[in-house]
Amino acid sequence: MKLLKWIGIVIASIILIVVVGGLLLSDKGHVARTGFVDASPRQVKALVNDLSLIKSWSPWLAMDTNAVLTFSGPTKGVEAKYTWVSEKLDNGSYTIASSTPEKIEIDLVFGQMEPALATFTFTPKGNGTEVTWTLDTDAKGNIFSRWFNVMLDLMVGPDFEKGIASMSSPAKKIAMGKIVQMEEYNCAGGFGLGIRSTIKASEIGTTLAKHYGAIIQFMAQNNITMEGYPMAIYHTWDGKTTDMEAVIPIKAPAKGNETIHPVILDKGPMIIAHYYGPYEDSEMAHTACLAWLKEHGKTARSAPFEEYVGDPGTEKDPMKWLTKVYYSY
């Protein structure tokens, strides 16, 4: 009986320590690891931003090559998502929540745990990139999750180190777009027909295709002549959503309908970045234009716009796609 009594005391003490200790612990958990990747920041960002490449560097997927992955949404950028089912890793999901040139945020779910936020930041360093990978968790009052947070660094930190160390090889293989020219130009302005909408960043490609098709059909029905290449005016942009206007330039002013409206194209001095590469990487051209404006002491006076030269339907190599990015000043 004494033995049972002592066993009971020990068990009760352990429970007391777990409960009382858990009440004193913080809800917040944080892990951070930093390492060097032998590739440019744009290449590393492109690697992390493209879920079709996740197996080439993910430390967790390397632990279980038999994990079943299911992808949904776009393959790149905001709302790109995959779920996994694994006997070794438990089940979970991985969703890109935000994506900028300097940082990518991931909504991460492991099993029955509370959702966590993983963040990748990319900082130029020498000829490569310093990558910082962090994980932030919130136990939300759950005592056992608080204890898990205590062990989080030991459990996850080494995986982060392996993941960062695995990025160099696949990142260096990624072909990136490039800016071939920065041009000062005095635009004469003009006319267009457009459709404006506020959409998710992941919907830009499909929305432009849909709107261009509707505008061109309307033009054909009304004998309106196209004058130039398709354009997109970005009235707002926060990395997740955009107030965007798909525009087809036309030879002379024309009326629209309940969806399609007339557009007066901007005129005056502008800086133009000539960018070749995938459309989703054209943000570098915007960054270059903004840097030029700052360097020359000028301020953008209206919304920037992109002009899409050529036809990706006939030219399959994205490295030959020309996008001209315009900023007025």
Image (cartoon, rainbow, N blue to C red):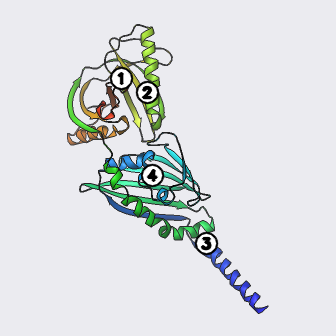
Tell me the CA gap for discs 2 and 1: 9 Å
- Tell me residue 128's x, y (percent): 27, 55
Residue at image location 33% in from the left, 54% down from the top: 169
- At label 3, the amino acid type is Gly
Q: Quadrant of residue 67?
A: bottom right
**Residue designated by label 3:** 22
Residue ID for mark 1:
230
The local crowd at label 1, few if under 14, some if 14 to 19, many if 20 or more residues have their Cα within 10 Å, is some
Q: Image point 28% across, 20% down: which residue?
A: 189
Amino acid type of the residue tagged 4 in the rendering: Lys
Q: Position of residue 240 (x, y in %)?
A: 45, 41
Name the residue tied to disc 2.
208
State how far apart marks 1 and 3 are (Cα).
Answer: 60 Å
Decide which of 67, 41 is in the foreground and name it: 67
Which quadrant does the N terminus fall into? bottom right
Identify the mark nearer the N-term, 1 or 4.
Answer: 4
Circle number at residue 71:
none
Which residue is rendered at x = 25% and y = 34% of the image?
273
Name which residue lies at 44% across and 60% down. 134
Kind of residue at badge 1: Pro
| Label 1 vs label 3, nearer the camera | 1
Alpha carbon separation for disc pair 4 and 3: 36 Å
Under mark 2, the amino acid is Leu
